[in-house]
């Protein structure tokens, strides 16, 4: 069982989120957002804070029954153009991969938005992140568009799941 709580970005929680980021060098390599060879708390903390504190955004932390942080998800609560909630980033501790934690976090997010009356949830998967597309497809997400992302113009699959 995974519980989702709003990120505080303090103390041990922040240390855990940084460790999760460090455990996923392939993601950072494919995104180009961070250089895995030089990533540190000093380079990651500002990014984590900026994304968590942006207007209309929220970061949720996934914990197991003992309180151990297993992953986190960053969300845009309502996209200004299409009105849907979007998952901006999902990262699970790379040392805990393939145990269903990512699926459990996503299910919690979907349940939340379904309860709030959302009819669909969307996300963008960078084409360069080849491992991500099969994960999202297995969870029922389907590609609805292929376009450059807004941040850097990178080829991105827009995926959607009807709730």
Image (spheres, grey):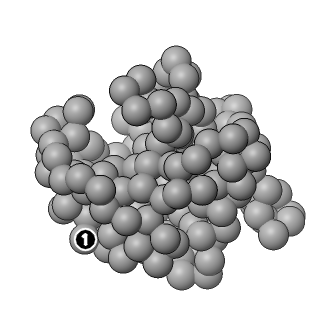
- Residue sitting at 22 percent across and 40 percent down? 149
State the image coordinates of residue 143 (x, y, percent, origin top left): 31, 62
Disc 1 target residue: 130
* Up-down relation of residue 2 to residue 50 (above or below): below
42 left or right of 139 in image: left
47 left or right of 108 in image: left
Which quadrant is home to the N terminus?
A: bottom right
- Residue sitting at 59 percent across and 70 percent down? 103
State the image coordinates of residue 71 (x, y, percent, origin top left): 60, 58
Q: Nearer the viewer, residue 20 or 147?
A: 147
Rendered image quadrant of residue 159: bottom left
State the image coordinates of residue 42 (x, y, percent, origin top left): 42, 33
**The furthest residue to the right:** 66
Q: Nearer the viewer, residue 62 or 17?
A: 62
Q: Nearer the viewer, residue 155 or 63?
A: 155
**The furthest residue to the bottom:** 98
162 left or right of 150 in image: right
- Residue sitting at 37 percent across and 65 percent down? 142
- Residue sitting at 41 percent across and 23 percent down? 80
């Amino acid at each position: 069982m995974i519980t989702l709580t709003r990120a505080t970005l303090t103390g041990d929680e922040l240390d855990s989120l940084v460790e999760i980021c460090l455990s996923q060098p392939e993601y950072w390599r494919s995104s180009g957002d961070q250089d895995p060879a030089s990533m540190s708390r000093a380079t990651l903390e500002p990014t984590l804070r900026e994304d968590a504190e942006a207007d209309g955004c929220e970061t949720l932390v996934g914990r197991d029954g003992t309180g151990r942080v297993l992953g986190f998800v960053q969300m845009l609560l309502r996209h200004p153009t299409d009105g849907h909630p979007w998952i901006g980033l999902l990262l699970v501790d790379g040392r805990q991969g393939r145990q269903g934690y990512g699926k459990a976090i996503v299910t919690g997010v979907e349940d939340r938005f379904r309860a709030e009356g959302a009819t669909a949830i969307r996300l963008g998967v960078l084409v360069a992140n080849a491992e991500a597309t099969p994960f999202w497809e297995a969870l029922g997400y389907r590609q609805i568009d292929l376009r450059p992302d807004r941040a850097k113009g990178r080829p991105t699959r827009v995926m959607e799941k009807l709730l």
